[in-house]
Amino acid sequence: MPSKLRLVDSWVNNTPKGAEWDDTEVPTKLFPGLADRYRAGRTTEELVAEMDESGIEEAVICAGWDLKHNDMSWVLDALDRFPERFHGLLTIDPFKAMDGVRELESCVKDHGFKMARIAALRTLIPYDDPRCYPFYAKCVELDVPISINVGLPGPLVAAAEFQHPIVLDKICAFFPELKVVMAHGGDPWTELCVKLMQKWQNIYYMTSAFSPRRLPQPIIRYMNGSGSDRIMWASDYPLLTFDRCVAEIEDMEFRDDTVRQKFVADNARRVIIGQA
């Protein structure tokens, strides 16, 4: 039975049927059944059906990460066929330099993408590297947020030093208009993530790859206190399944239903999608 909540998933990935996956790229050991979900894959229609079953009205879908399986063509097709259900997110590549900046601009202006994303676990460069700054400036110009992976990465790459959230203090000082969404939990620096949100008005936090029942206590306390407008749910599907996330959300303790609704949908609609 679909959830009574009106949900928006802030991060969903493509899982093409019959694809081969490298366990060093996706943390299959951390997520039971993930390897099987990747191998089984989903058509866009099957993905929409899963969303319907769990009461998920809209999802932000990721392009630019999986070059081997051309997830860009999948995202563009999904946006074209299901415009009321999906919103585009582009993973930026700082090594593309101005070609990458122009790609971001095209995705936003020509295809309606709602957010950019950068992940040091992929680039293996720090977020304050000069190659990243043109993308931050373009996000400000286009008025789209950027999702930035923070915390110890799950994939088997040595990128933890590049994903320490303290670097966001420098970035937000240089780009005070930039809307930053901290992704992937920030563990083991979640207290710092809260401090950053308390300091900078344009920093937010999404729970991608963290199951709702495992959310760090500093985040839950902040969400139920003064930070109810800053925290948003994301599954990072297929790392976490929709039905598991929804069931765990329904068991979470919130200060009130307004905070719960902000967490599952309203904050994502406001910050990412641009709806009041």
Image: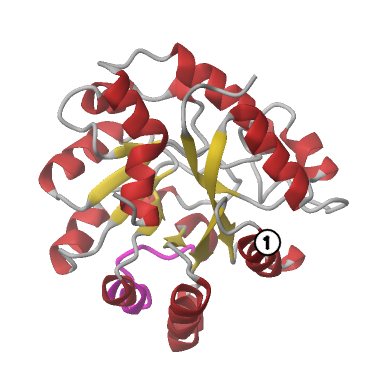
Residue 136: x and y, percent? Answer: 31, 71
| Observer able to see residue 186 | no
Name the image colouring.
secondary structure
| Observer able to see residue 175 | yes
**Rendered residue at 68%/48% (across/down):** 24
Residue 135 magenta = yes
Magenta span: predominant SS is: loop
Residue 23: x and y, percent? Answer: 73, 45
Residue 217 magenta = no
Residue 61: x and y, percent? Answer: 57, 54
Span shown in magenta: 123-137
**Rendered residue at 28%/25% (across/down):** 258
Quadrant assignment, res 57 = top right
Residue at the disc numbered 1:
81
Left or right: residue 194 versus residue 129 is left
Q: Indicate the quadrant containing the N terminus: top left, top right, bottom left or bottom right.
A: top right
**Rendered residue at 72%/35% (across/down):** 34
Left or right: residue 141 versus residue 236 is left
**Rendered residue at 45%/75% (across/down):** 94
- Numbered disc 1: secondary structure: helix
Residue 41: x and y, percent? Answer: 80, 45
Residue sitting nearer the eye, 94 or 69: 69
Residue sitting nearer the eye, 252 or 30: 252
Above or below, comparing residue 39 to residue 108 in the picture: above
Amino acid under disc 1: Arg
Label 1: how many Cα within 10 Å (few below 14, some 14–19, many 20+): few
Left or right: residue 211 versus residue 48 is left
Total tally of numbered discs in the picture:
1
Residue sitting nearer the eye, 16 or 67: 16
